[in-house]
Amino acid sequence: QEILEFAEQVEIDKVQEILDRQIEMNTNIAQAGLAQEYGAQIGRTLLEVYGDGVTTRARALAAAGSDARMGGCSLPVVINSGSGNQGMTVSLPVIAYARELGVSKEKCYRALLISNLVSIYQKHYIGSLSSFCGAVTAAGGCGAAITYLHGGDYEAICRTIINTTANV
């Protein structure tokens, strides 16, 4: 609840710089992952097999960023919870949905805050040594933000986080 309240009430100019950096850097590496043959090329394969719908594009961007990062691309990323792949997971699908839905830049920033902070909050309770992959907490944050972009309230956001975690 406090994360949602913070995201909805914070003055955007206080968080805009880091979120602009996250949008720019993480988008750049995802585009590199789609344009070049990095790693397993999961991002490229998703788009080729399933088309360019927003659900596929959201997954493909995160996968392409990871393909590039893990495949040797030297472009920087903005991390989450100490991980570049988690940083891309909390941001790239949210950015894709924000663009698809045509929401304002401010709403996109607020959604990115939800995604980043929910992921960090969940990660806090997992600890530093766990068999539970941090990408799951990033996916929970991402899902919460996408629910927010679609107009979901606190209860809907909570159910999204629960469903994401329960699936694992």
Image (cartoon, helix red, strand yellow):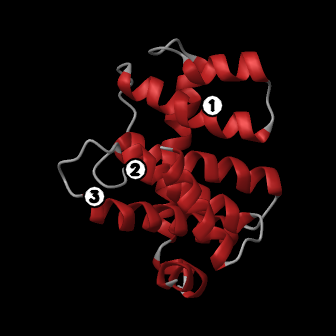
Image-based side of 10 in relation to 69, left or right: right
Q: Position of residue 59 (x, y in %)?
A: 62, 36
Q: Position of residue 48 (x, y in %)?
A: 73, 16
| Displayed quadrant of residue 152 | bottom right
**Which residue is more in the foreground, 160 or 42?**
160
Report the amino acid beneath label 1.
Ala
In percent of the image, x 53 and y 24: which residue is there? 33
In front: mark 2 or mark 3?
Answer: 3
In percent of the image, x 23 and y 47: which residue is there? 130
**Mark drawn on residue 121:** none
Judged from the image, the secondary structure of the residue bearing numbered disc 1 is: helix
Q: Alpha-carbon neighbours of circle 3 within 10 Å: few (<14), some, or many (≥20)?
A: some
Indicate whether 124 appears above or below 135: below
Residue receiving disc 2: 78
**Mark drawn on residue 126:** 3
Report the amino acid beneath label 2.
Val
Q: Earlier in the sequence, mark 3 or mark 1?
A: 1
